[in-house]
Amino acid sequence: MAQWEAELAAEAQAATAGVTADGGDLAAEWEAMVGGGGSMGERFNMPAGAERILNQDEIDSLLGFDLSEDDYNERSGIRAIINSAMVSYERLPMLEIVFDRLVRLMTTSLRNFTSDNVEVSLDNISSIRFGDYLNSIPLPAILAVFRAEELDNYGLLTVDSNLIYSIVDVLLGGRRGTAALRIEGRPYTTIERVLVQRMVEVVLNDARQAFEPLTAVNFNLDRLETNPRFAAIARPANAAILVKLRIDMEDRGGRIELLLPYATLEPIRKMLLLQFMGEKFGRDNIWESHLATELWTTQMEVRAVLDEQQVPLSRVLNLKVGETIVLNAQADSPVQLRCGQIPLTTGRMGRKGHSIAVRVDTPLALSTKRRLTQMKKK
């Protein structure tokens, strides 16, 4: 800083001697600003020779591009403003129950699959943009694209290299306590891909069972990819749910990441908004008893139809006062009882006291009761 100040002072003196009066005044003013109050470092309370430069961590924190391995949801800066409109997984409470159930199912199924002591743990659940996730996948890895048949959309399952080599080592009889042999820079062999595919099918079957209390959905493996470009199942800006699962097999293990776009979960969004598993049935004993009481006290209009005829419109328009319409009904003809357009039952017409009455001959059909109940609910 002192050297810079000396250079500025020399330039200011040269400018004062060799330029016009206006330029000299400007240089003199600049020299006074720099040197009038001591050195620049002293004016800004900085030691001589020190220069304040932002390091990379501070720049990343300012811009919000600090994508650490386990910190997708704690962002700040510009990235926080961009992602403020993204739906958080915390607004879907049932997802945590589903994924917790998935962890328990995977622990049992992977133990049977590997015949080893397997522990599955849920690292975290977060919301992320699909494009950001593809850019953050550590390669090499195997990406399994699967299809949710009933939801008519796709999902992504990522298996990292540590877990791939661990699974191959376990299934092919590797010794415990020895690190799996890893050869970087080569594609995965057919044997490795087949073994990983079998493990992925086991995980997808567990995912089907985890979602079964909510809705029946089958996850079918579509293809295996090693390049994230070929595993694009959504637009880069689309939001998705990312679930990180840790699989430990004593001294070996790795990580599985399950990504479900919000478009895949949209058909069952109402179910995922439930607060607890029993709420999915939508039953409330108090409301049911109240509804039954109201139905029993509901008044409805019942019509007794003696006869129906179809006549031309011209005859109806030519009817005059005093004309008689003859009905095809006798004293013992059956009378049909209706509620609106729904036929209820039939009966016989008679008299009780000073009122005309109808004696019901047949009971109401079960289908008729259901239709009447639906009409009252509407």
Image: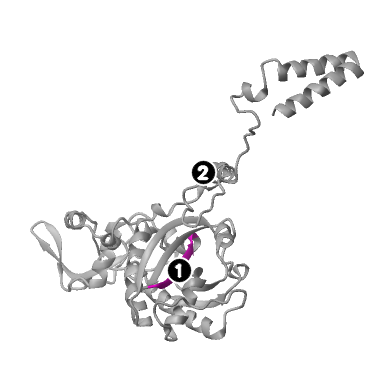
Quadrant holding the C terminus: bottom left
Main SS of the magenta segment?
strand
Q: Quadrant of residue 105?
A: bottom left
- Residue that badge 1 annotates: 256
Q: Is residue 143 left or right of residue 20?
A: left
Whole-percent x, y for residue 279 in the image:
28, 59
- Residue 313: where, in percent of width, then height? 45, 63
Q: How is the image coloured?
A: one colour
| Quadrant where the image shows the N terminus | top right
As drawn, the residue found furthest toward the left would be: 353
Q: CA distance from mark 2 to mark 1?
A: 27 Å
Magenta stretch bounds: 251-262
The amino acid at mark 1 is Ile
- Residue 8's spot in the image, x, y percent? 78, 24
Q: Disc 1 on helix, strand or loop?
A: strand
| Sequence-first tag of 2 and 1 | 2
| Residue named by callout 2 | 76
